[in-house]
Image: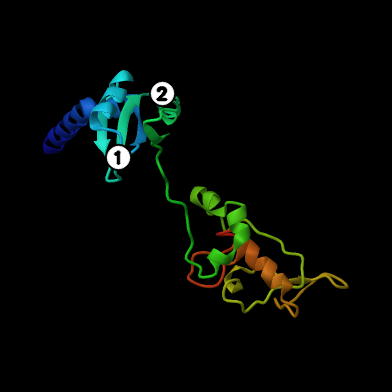
Amino acid sequence: MNKFIANIIFFSLFLAFWHTPGYAIENQSDRVIVKFRSHIAQSERATLLKSFGLSKSEQLKLADTLVLQVPKNKADDLAAKFSKNPLIEYAEKDNLAYALDFPNDPLYPSQWGLSKIEAEGGWSTTHGSNSVRIAITDTGIDGTHPDLAGKIVASVDCTNSCVSVNPTDGDGHGTHVAGIASATTNNDLGVAGVGYDHTS
């Protein structure tokens, strides 16, 4: 009986929240950030906003900058119009920002190629799967390399005939390539691999 009553109370609170005016406004409107030029008087700002049928929504800490509540799907249009007004320094739609998946590997900031392919955006969607294997055809792989040792599934020498061998690399190039593809990522060590959770 107590569980039944608790469920009724929870459902009632849920409905009360669902129908609050703040919730309705949030879902039926967008926001535009507007920065007025510093010499524009408050009365001029208010008059301009009123001409668009708007009022101040929120004052930001940044001087002369407001967040305006605007009708749904009108933010881009209003931001463009505000941007052309000589009283306003800039205006833009207030978009949600999402943190990207930035690994802690110490050499990652110098890996310009991963930035070029926007790897962080991909990692924020998925890290892939260790069931996916990557084949590296090169000079071999150093099987003792701490960023790769746990990821090597097999090593084959096909110089004359393809035979299984211990993972070694006398040249270093294959290890470098394998590291770009599948070094252990986000382990506070070395570089980050594109294939975050993949094996080689």
Comparing 153 with 72, the one in front is 72
Comparing 194 with 44, the one in front is 44
Q: What's the amino acid at mark 2?
A: Lys
Q: What's the amino acid at mark 1?
A: Asp
From this view, report whether residue 53 is shown above or below residue 33.
Answer: above
Identify the residue at horizontal 88%, vertical 73% (top origin): 160
Could you tell me which secondary element the residue under label 2 belongs to?
Answer: loop
Identify the residue at horizontal 72%, vertical 70% (top origin): 174
Q: Give coordinates of residue 127: x percent, y percent.
A: 53, 54
Comparing 74 with 6, the one in front is 74
Comparing 18 with 91, the one in front is 91
From this view, report whether residue 4 is shown above or below residue 177.
Answer: above
Separation (CA) of disc 2 from disc 1: 22 Å
From this view, report whether residue 136 is shown above or below residue 163.
Answer: above
Give the residue number, with chain letter if any, for mark 2.
Answer: 74
Question: Where, quadrant-wise, is the C terminus in this rendering?
Answer: bottom right
Q: Give coordinates of residue 175: x percent, y percent.
A: 68, 72
Could you tell me which secondary element the residue under label 1 belongs to?
Answer: loop
10 lies left or right of 64: left
